[in-house]
Image: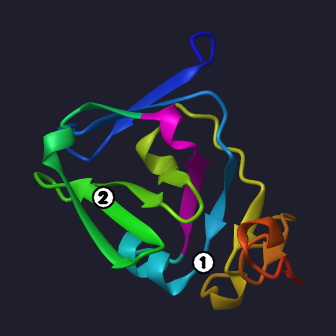
């Protein structure tokens, strides 16, 4: 990955810094209730990375975490409370929130858990009922 593009970002106060390298495994929007509650917003923009593409470059000891279920371990800065990322061990991926890496060219490809949506987005992207079939979901799409 030495020739791959890297992007840096961090939490709200800057105490925790993260770097992602290469290309994400996927990008999009999640509408599930869990992400909405966690982000305090109607939708969460995600970038999914293989673990070796994500590196905490500063403040690793300042990260706190919480696992509501074994499917995710959400992490945030203990100083400012700024959300940084969510590890998804069952998928083998890490979601570094798109807003955390401001210079990354976010190009969403789909919406997941759209059946739980509270904000209709008419952007022409596929709207999946849950998640793609290759990730254990139904792969079923919904109408905009």
Q: Residues within 10 Å of mark 1 (few under 14, many from 20)?
A: many
Vertical placement of residue 51 versus 111, above or below: above
User: Residue 40: image x %, image y %?
Assistant: 38, 75
User: Residue 108: image x %, image y %?
Assistant: 72, 53
Q: Residue at x 87, y 65 (%)?
A: 124
Please state the total of marks drawn on the protein image.
2
Q: Quadrant of residue 106?
A: top right
Q: Is residue 84 magenta?
A: no
What segment carries the magenta color? 43-54
**Direction left: furthest residue:** 79
Q: Quadrant of the N terminus?
A: top right
Q: Residues within 10 Å of mark 2 (few under 14, many from 20)?
A: many
Circle number at residue 31: 1
In-front residue for pair 134/60: 134
The answer for how far apart the CA atoms under marks 1 and 2 are is 19 Å
Circle number at residue 43: none
Q: Quadrant of residue 127?
A: bottom right
Q: Residue at x 40, y 70 (%)?
A: 39
Residue where numbered disc 2 is placed: 75
Q: Does label 1 or label 2 sit earlier along the sequence? A: 1
């Amino acid at each position: 990955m030495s020739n791959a593009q890297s992007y840096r970002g961090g939490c709200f106060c800057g105490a925790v810094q993260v770097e992602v390298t290469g290309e994400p495994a996927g990008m999009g929007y999640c509408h599930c209730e869990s992400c909405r509650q966690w982000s305090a917003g109607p939708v969460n923009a995600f970038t999914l990375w293989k673990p070796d593409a994500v590196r905490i470059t500063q403040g690793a000891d300042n990260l706190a975490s919480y696992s509501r279920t074994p499917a995710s371990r959400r992490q945030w800065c203990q100083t400012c409370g700024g959300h940084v990322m969510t590890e998804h061990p069952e998928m083998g991926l890490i979601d570094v929130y798109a807003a955390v890496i401001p210079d990354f060219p976010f190009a969403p490809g789909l919406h997941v858990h759209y059946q739980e949506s509270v904000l209709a987005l008419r952007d022409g992207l596929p709207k999946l009922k849950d998640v793609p079939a290759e990730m254990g979901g139904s792969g079923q799409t919904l109408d905009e």
